[in-house]
Image: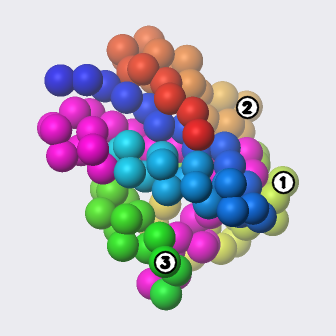
Amino acid sequence: MQKVAVVVLADIETHEAAGRVTNALATAKELQENQDEVKIIFDGAATRWIPELEDENHKMHPLYKAVKGNVAGACKFCAKAFGVINEIGKTDVPLLDDYEDHPSLRNYIVDGYQIVTF
C-alpha cells in the first residue's frame, strides 16, 4: 500500500488549470481504488476550487464527490488570501493551519507520504 499526498496548486482561471485539477482528482481516485492511502490538499490558488467543485452542477463535481472522503482540507492562509474562506467555511472541507496558517507538508513526509503536486 502506498501513502500519497496529492497537493493541488492550480488556479481556476484556465483550461490548463482545469486539466491539472482533473488529473489530481483522477490520480486520487486511482490510488483510492487500489486501496492506497491518499490525502488531497488544496493549497495556494487551488483553494478557489473548493466552492467550484462543491457545486453539484460543476462538470467535475462527480469526480470530486468520488474522492471527497480523501480531501484532507484547504490551506487556511491561502483561503483568506484568495477570498474563499467564507465559502469554504460553508462546506465540510477543513481549513488546514498546522504550520503558520498553512498545511504542514513536513508532517506528511514524516508520516511516510509521497508528495505529488498538480
Residue 58 horizontal side relative to residue 67, left or right: right
Any part of residue 70 in sight: no
Which tag, 3 or 1, sits closer to the chain's start? 3
Q: Which disc, if any, is residue 100? A: 2
Separation (CA) of disc 2 from disc 3: 34 Å
The residue where tag 3 is placed is 59
Q: Quadrant of residue 14?
A: bottom right
Q: Residue at x 69, y 71 (%)?
A: 86
Residue 1: x and y in percent read 18, 23
Q: Residue at x 48, y 46 (%)?
A: 24
Which tag, 1 or 2, sits closer to the chain's start? 1
Task: Say if 96 sits above or below 61 in the image.
Answer: above
Separation (CA) of disc 1 from disc 2: 14 Å
Residue 90: x and y in percent read 56, 75
Look at discs 1 and 2 and give the one toward the viewer: 1
Is 11 within the magenta? no
Task: Say if 30 sits above or below 55 in the image.
Answer: above
Q: Amino acid at mark 2?
A: Glu
The residue where tag 1 is placed is 81
Residue 6: x and y in percent read 47, 37
**Callout 3: 10 Å neighbours few (<14), some, many (20+)?**
few
Residue 36: x and y in percent read 22, 33
Q: Amino acid at mark 1?
A: Ala
**Callout 2: 10 Å neighbours few (<14), some, many (20+)?**
few
Residue 117 horizontal side relative to residue 16, left or right: left
Residues at discs 3 and 1 in contact (Cβ within 8 Å): no
Residues at discs 1 and 2 in contact (Cβ within 8 Å): no
Determine whether the residue tagged by mark 1 lies in a helix, strand or loop: helix
Q: Residue at x 52, y 70 (%)?
A: 53
Most extreme residue toward the bottom, as rendered?
57
